[in-house]
Amino acid sequence: MCGIAGIHNLRGERYPRLGQALGVMNGLQRHRGPDGEGVWEHRSGAVGFGHRRLSVIDLASGQQPMRDAEGNWVTYNGEIYNYLELREELGLESFATRSDTEVILCAYRKWGQDCVSRFRGMFAFALWDEANQTLFCARDRFGIKPFYYTTVGGTFYFASEIKALLPFLPEVRTDLEGFKEYVTFQFCLAGRTLYRDVAELTPGHVLVAKNGSVETRRYWEVWYDLDFDHTAKYFEERIQALLDESVRLHLRSDVPVGAYVSGGLDSSIVASLAAQRQGEGFQGFTGKFSLGPAYDESRYAQDLAKWRGFELHETEITAADFVEHIRQVIYHLDYPVAGPGSFPQYMVAGLAARHRKVVLGGQGGDEIFGGYARYLIAYFEQCIKAAIDGTMHNGNFIVTYESIIPNLEALREYKPLLQEFWRKGLFEKLDKRYFRLINRARDLGDEVNWEAIERYTPYETFRSIFRGRNVQKESYFDSMTHFDFKTLLPALLHVEDRMSMAHGLESRVPFLDHPLIELAATIPSDVKFKNGRMKHVLKNAMRGVLPESIANRTDKMGFPVPLQEWITQPGIVQEFARDVLSSQRALTRDLVDNRKVLEGLAQEPRFGRKLWGLLCLELWQQTFHDRAASFTHLLEAEGTT
């Protein structure tokens, strides 16, 4: 796991002081690779790469950027977990190192741009093809590893983090479409970011820069071709086999590997399988808030550690930690995304980094197997509609209202959401109902300058993903999980990557192994979500690797943050929020009226996201917009302007 950067003048002209510019980009990503750095400049001066290294595989000879005998160069971030098998297939005599980086170069020589389809892992890389004078870039299928880019004055820049691109932008500006998507979903869609003129390479895509043009194309898609020929038992056995194999591959490392252990189903499965394989010396890491059981599931993490017999490290996270670290969280995120979980994840990653260089996590299980309560809310409405219309047994209705009722206990904490959701639009079309369910803009009023962003509506972008050609339109469950898989999951992976790399820690996610994803996409909804039981097939498949207390859990938590208690009651968090939102600059923002935000501090509901989202926007403005000149000054200090 590392940090990559690069510059390519698309006209083939020499870039002034290329090495110094790459050094600035490396410096801004130093935290991603504390073990070393490298810079390569092409003899033409028109292209060059930077790299910061976190040494995990082939500690002695895996330095980057790396060159092959044909003059191709690569800068790479991630892990190719099947690199040993690919080395065998490509011929061991072809290799001078034991690194997976060299596998990329050799695979490209043999298979060209199609090499990415051979890789099983998480990756973002840029490769200079000397013979064809082409820059070839790729990002893994799910967006585990980041890749951002911009073109300024005929020069293409890329990096693992946006902060490394900011010195080259004429000015730091907010992308209005990205902003409206953020206030709607708390993440951006379709490769947009919150920065105007900065895009991310979409997961499962490659980018090619040649002859002055930059083009992208998709190389992988997940297809929901449902398999009605096999039984639930067959799918459970396949899930067991593929997850076990994925964990085995994800444990490949030349340094010790640990695991996040939240106490939830997904991280517990991963940690249990890993501890079973690794044996003595395995370590887990968890965190908790000491505000009562609603914010503390460490007892489940302790149950797993005791049951599987590994050491568990624990950190207690406080309001003082929030005030001390939230600015660093926003700095490392580059722009706000997803919910408050980034803060506790930052804290637990800091704990893990003191003991391990690599950790495994459970990210992805909810989006693959259906673990969010909103799926149950949406489907319950459709069951009622079908019962009224007399169409319960027509089409692809996966559960009946009679069978779903015993599982509605999972919605106990969601009564306010249910009230709001059913207040308008009951029984509308499925896409409109799911959009209403996930639309966070409904909580916002005159805090946001809607006139400035009224020209764009995210609904059509949402609908194009929700009704993707790879999903059977009759399957509501697959449409919901597919949208989250393509949008929410990359946002959560954004958090996963930045919060771990802030501490020089590599985070791996075994659920996101494409053979497992491709299998899950074929499982009929009535197997995945039987009787409205969230993640039914996964729970049945993996029950044998979990203690009873976790296998039988029905109180899904997801590391909730007590922000409502902290921010609505007198104390250091409320004081901090008031200071942030009442500064002179905060009160003169174009897109957010922070006076209105201040007025609403006391009205934040429990587990609400409104104040979190608006506070993070202001911290982002202060960190990057108000300090934009400090990034340009880095170039001036290096004499590159």
Image (spheres, rainbow, N blue to C red):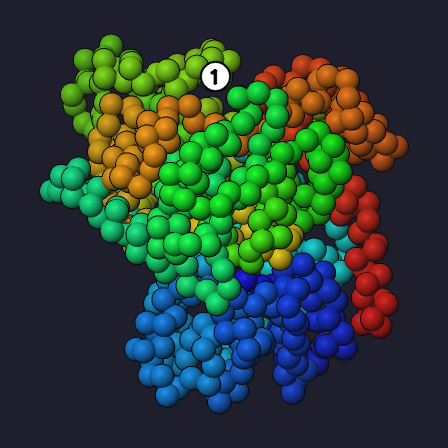
Quadrant location of the N terminus in the rendered image: bottom right
Q: How many marks?
A: 1
The quadrant in which residue 476 appears is: top left
Residue located beneath label 1 in the image: 413
**Compared to 527, does 7 lie above or below?**
below
Neighbours of disc 1 within 10 Å: few (<14), some (14-19), many (20+): few
Quadrant location of the C terminus in the rendered image: bottom right
* Residue 15 percent across, percent down from the top left: 72, 77
Residue 548 visible in the snapshot = yes
* Residue 154 percent across, percent down from the top left: 66, 69
Task: Looking at the picture, tell me which residue is in the foreground, 74 or 361.
Answer: 361
Disc 1 marks which amino acid?
Glu
Horizontal side of residue 119 vs 286, given as left or right? left
Q: Residue furthest right?
A: 584
Horizontal side of residue 77 vs 19, given as left or right? left
For image coordinates 69% across by 62% down, the residue present is: 30
